[in-house]
Image: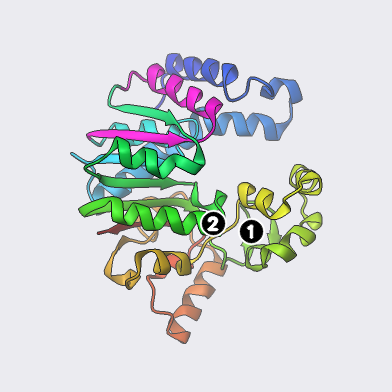
Amino acid sequence: MTLSPAQRSKIEDVLRRTYYAEQPPEKTDTEAAWADFEDHVRVRYEQALLHVVPWVERTAGLAGRRVVELGSGTGSSTAAFAQHCERIHGYEICPVSTAAARGRLDALEIRNAEVTVVDPSTMLDTIGSNHPDGADAVLLYAVLEHMTFNERLVVLEAAWKFLEPGGIIVVVETPNRLAYFDSHTSQLPFFGMLPPEIAVRYVDRSPRRQLVDELRAADDKVLKLSRWGLGLSYHEFELAFDRPLRDVVVADGYEEEIVAIYPVEKDEELLREYFAECGVDVPVGFARSPLNFVVRK
């Protein structure tokens, strides 16, 4: 279901009291601030509900699945997936995001979902303790790019081991480091391919002044840039799953539901051609940006 006027009003109120309490959009009253607010209120939820969920449902099935979500944010994807799976439990490291997610679930009267705030250093232990029998699905929605390289590998390896046979990992909206243009973080060409040590020095050329200012002020600039978001590629997934990706990927982001929200760009076509010409033996979806795929154990 898309948002009714009453539901939208409740969610706006929840977000103003939690996620946007210190910086409501009307305080800055900029086009970017209002776009971000609308994104959290409606756009992310409806994109997940109308495109991502049907994509997963058609290619891998969601009915009866118990889903564990890492990085549930303000609950847009949690609420969307809850309407098609048996149960979803989201984990989030930010308390205000967790409060916003709980408020969203209440506003939508969703009862088969919950969100828990966790310390990032103990997240995997907490999930293992809370789900001793594992899960049927792990959801990684716009989250892997905000981790360090080591964190990504640990999470992906743990998610794979955590799954029961036939279980799935769903990766959504993760920027591809092999993409020619970094639209996620720096808005600069070829930025995603730079080693972090060079990227933190080159980032001054970004048109995103908040990014530049935060990096200048940070003690650990590489970590700060990681939290803003750095792309992944097929390499992390090959390392984490330790098997050919063609054997486990069941949806690669070229399906109609994903193309409807992420039309294929010229640089993706060129990268796909390069994969074929050079014999890069991975699913063609790893030429897409962002990366959207489903793997089955």
State whether residue 293 is above or below residue 9.
below
Image location (x, y in percent) of residue 80: 36, 34
Tell me if 215 is positioned left or right of 267 in this view.
Answer: right
Q: Secondary structure at mark 2?
A: loop
- The region drawn magenta spans 86-110
The residue where tag 1 is placed is 182
Residue 45 image-quadrant placement: top left
Tell me if 54 is positioned left or right of 20 in this view.
Answer: left
Residue 253 image-quadrant placement: bottom left
**Does the CB distance between marks 1 and 2 fall below 8 Å?**
yes
Q: Quadrant of the C terminus?
A: bottom left
- Is residue 7 at all visible to an observer of this figure? yes
Image location (x, y in percent) of residue 99: 49, 22
Residue 267 image-quadrant placement: bottom right
Question: In the rendered structure, which amino acid carries the disc numbered 1?
Answer: Asp
Asked whether 95 or 258 is in front, the reply is 95
Residue at 37 percent of width and 61 percent of height:
252
Count of marks, rendered view:
2
Mark 1 nearby-residue class (10 Å; few <14, some 14–19, many ≥20): many
The residue where tag 2 is placed is 175
Tell me if 63 is positioned left or right of 284 in this view.
Answer: left
Image location (x, y in percent) of residue 32: 69, 35
Mark 2 nearby-residue class (10 Å; few <14, some 14–19, many ≥20): many
- Is residue 290 at all visible to an observer of this figure? no
In magenta segment, residue 190: no
Image location (x, y in percent) of residue 200: 74, 58
